[in-house]
Image: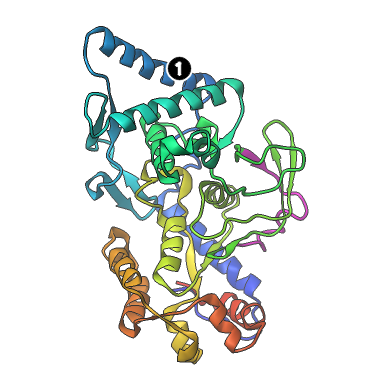
Amino acid sequence: MAFMPRGPEASFFEVLDQHRASLLAALRRGGEEPAGSGMRLASSSEVLSSIEKIIQDIVTSLARNEAPAFTIDNRSSWENIKFEDSVGLHMVSHCTTRKIKSDSPKSVKNFALILKIFSMIYKLVQSNTYATKRDIYYTDSQLFGNQTVVDNIINDISCMLKVPRRSLHISDPKCLYDLAGEHENGLRSIKCTREKGFIYDYYFFQLSTSKGLIAGDLKYLEEDGTKVNCTRATGKGVPDLNTRLLVKKLWDTFHIPVFTLVDADPHGIEIMCIYKYGSMAMSFEAHNLTVPAIRWLGLLPSDIKRLNIPKCTLIPLTKRDQMKLDSILKRPYITCQPFWRKEMEIMADSKMKAEIQALTFLSSDYLSRVYLPNKLKFGGWI
């Protein structure tokens, strides 16, 4: 749990200071992992060389009258996933693989699609241009069939080349920030500066929510000297890659306390889990994306009873919700989060869920005027 209340005279800034100090002490005790110690950004020439080598292997196989195939790490098996509290879910070094064969009726189309996207990535990197996953899908939507096919192939390629997805010049369709006069597709490596308005001491915190990312006004310099002024930073719903990169960057650079405010339902909990410990799909890039220091601020299932939120504002759990909740409870990180388990058991027992908007029953401004200030002031997070 969080800190014990410090009394009515204590401001939530003081409690945040105390929380930040405890996080830093924990990092020192555990031996903090250097920022960016995971999958490193690859240069354009390195990416191009890696793609050329793969194509050369295909040509060599054909010259030998052998059917070429792609060997891809199996990202969908828990056997290949390891959990560490300091990193989250990440792939083991020697994991099982699967083959995408060009001579198999079951996989020949997937082989061709991978080859096509390799070609598109090569052109993007070579020309130093960027595209979203959605852009790639719409180059031939009938061929790809659906967006998920494109998303999975891009992740497989990133995993195959052992480079972060942003090194492929591909980003999520949701734009993380506005850059006046600059492209909006990639989040490049940034040098954060302590300019006024960007961070005031460390009385600045992040609130990653199921409704978006609230991070205040951000100002920093990019590596090429470009001044960036982010007056809005948003990433709604399940966090996209760029939003996770920003949260990770702010934590690595300033160790700013990070909290999640999500709906008291299984999918809200899933959002928090992705920010904190990552996902199976992106486990190969966990070191660059996860922030294990994140804390669950609300909406907690126990808050529903504590605040006497009436049943008429609650929503029954669907069968899909119950399956999601059961799935989360079986994940390896739940064993080191007993307070999470307790909250999820409260939800499972009640068979009810609540959206953040349920707080408006108490008053229209209850969330901003009472709930969040008191949660932060009295350390009401887990």
Q: Up-down: is 7 above or below 250?
A: below
Residue 27, x across and y down, in percent: 46, 54
* Left or right: where 159 falls relative to 120: left
Q: Residues within 10 Å of mark 1 (few under 14, many from 20)?
A: few
Comparing 34 with 117, the one in front is: 117
- What residue lies at 32% left-to-right and 64% top-to-bottom? 328
Pointer 1 residue: 49
Query: Residue 156 location, x and y as percent?
Result: 37, 36
Vertical position of residue 111 compared to residue 271: above or below? above
Q: Residue furthest front?
A: 142
Is residue 38 something one can see in this rendering?
no
Rendered position, 83 above or below 303:
above
- Quadrant assignment, res 59: top left
Amino acid marked by disc 1: Ser
* Quadrant in the rendering for residue 110: top left
Q: Quadrant of the C terminus?
A: bottom left
Q: Which residues are magenta?
A: 190-206
Q: Residue at the location (49% across, 34% down)?
A: 140
